[in-house]
Image (cartoon, coloured by chain):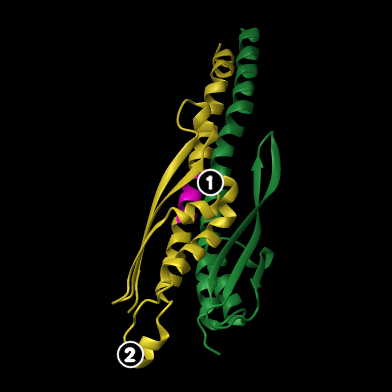
Chain colours: A yellow, B green
Amino acid sequence: MSAITTIAALPLLIIVLMTTLELGSLRVVAARARSAADLAVLVAVNDQDDGELQRSGTLVAAADAADVARTVFAANLDPLAPFLAATPADVAADAAIQVEPKPATVHLRVTVPVRTPLFGALFFHPITDVAVQANGGAR
Amino acid sequence: MRGESGLATLETTLMITILIPLLFAVIEFGDVFQRWLAQESATVQVARYAGELGGDAPEVRALLDGSLRSSGIDPSAATVDVTPARVGWREPLTVTVRTNAMVAIPFLFSAAIPLRTSAVVRGELAR
């Protein structure tokens, strides 16, 4: 009897296993996307206005800091491309990047669409949006 | 009585062959995810350091070895690429780390899953 119960419950057990794996994968992708955003902000904050630094000794964000953040973010998202529902370039293009020149501060906010096909098969959303936020300032 | 005992043994065997692989799959893949995150974190740290030093250097390798070892990953089994090996001020630098994570699930399979992590930064050393 217990063998029959186990076999009958097997599809449910497999679904639980697959959901666990998908959730684990989603968490890894989310962590890597956050890491990509952190790195992008860090590099952008280091993109100082050299002329201003030499003249006044103050750390002022360069004029292209937002572009730098976007480029580095896209480059770091690139290994995640198979897991994303949009291209890394499109995700980076949609990122809201705010640069405050003085003191040099960069804020990045983005929604990363991650493919979750198994959730889709289980009547949830096949794409899960992961909200990512990163902030950095020069000291 | 003898027949019932045999049936119970058969049922237990069936349950074990189904439930044990499921349990191990959760544990093993959880370990792979944890290892993937640890490797990612180590790669980012090392990329930042390589950017500050202007490229590949023994110190960069030593930092990666220490980070991987502290996460339970054998550094001697890792393949590391720092491209290009030497960068100037604000030039892009990519650090890629590749390892294999062993997954062994009883009664099903045993395989090495390749884990690849990379980080892109810019050179911060004015030569």
Which amino acid does the dot numbered 2 rest on? Gly
Dot 2, crowdedness within 10 Å: few (<14), some or many (≥20)? few
Looking at the image, tell me whether mark 1 or mark 2 is earlier in sequence order: 2
Q: Is residue A30 magenta?
A: yes
Where residue A44 sits in the image (x, y, percent)? 43, 71
Q: Is the magenta stretch mostly helix, strand or loop?
A: helix
Chain of the residue that carries numbered disc 2 in the rendered image? A
Left/right placement of residue A73 relative to residue B60 reads left
Looking at the rendered image, the quarter that the N terminus of chain B falls into is top right
Task: Find residue B102 and name its label.
Answer: none
Callouts 1 and 2 on one subunit: yes
Chain of the residue that carries numbered disc 1 in the rendered image? A
Where residue B116 sits in the image (x, y, percent)? 63, 57
The residue sitting at 43% across, 77% down in the picture is: A47
Q: Is residue A122 above or below residue B33?
A: above
| SS class, disc 1 | loop
* Disc 2: which residue: A57
Report if residue A15 is visible in the image. Answer: yes
Report if residue B35 is visible in the image. Answer: no
Left/right placement of residue A40 relative to residue A7 reads left
Residue range in magenta is A25-33
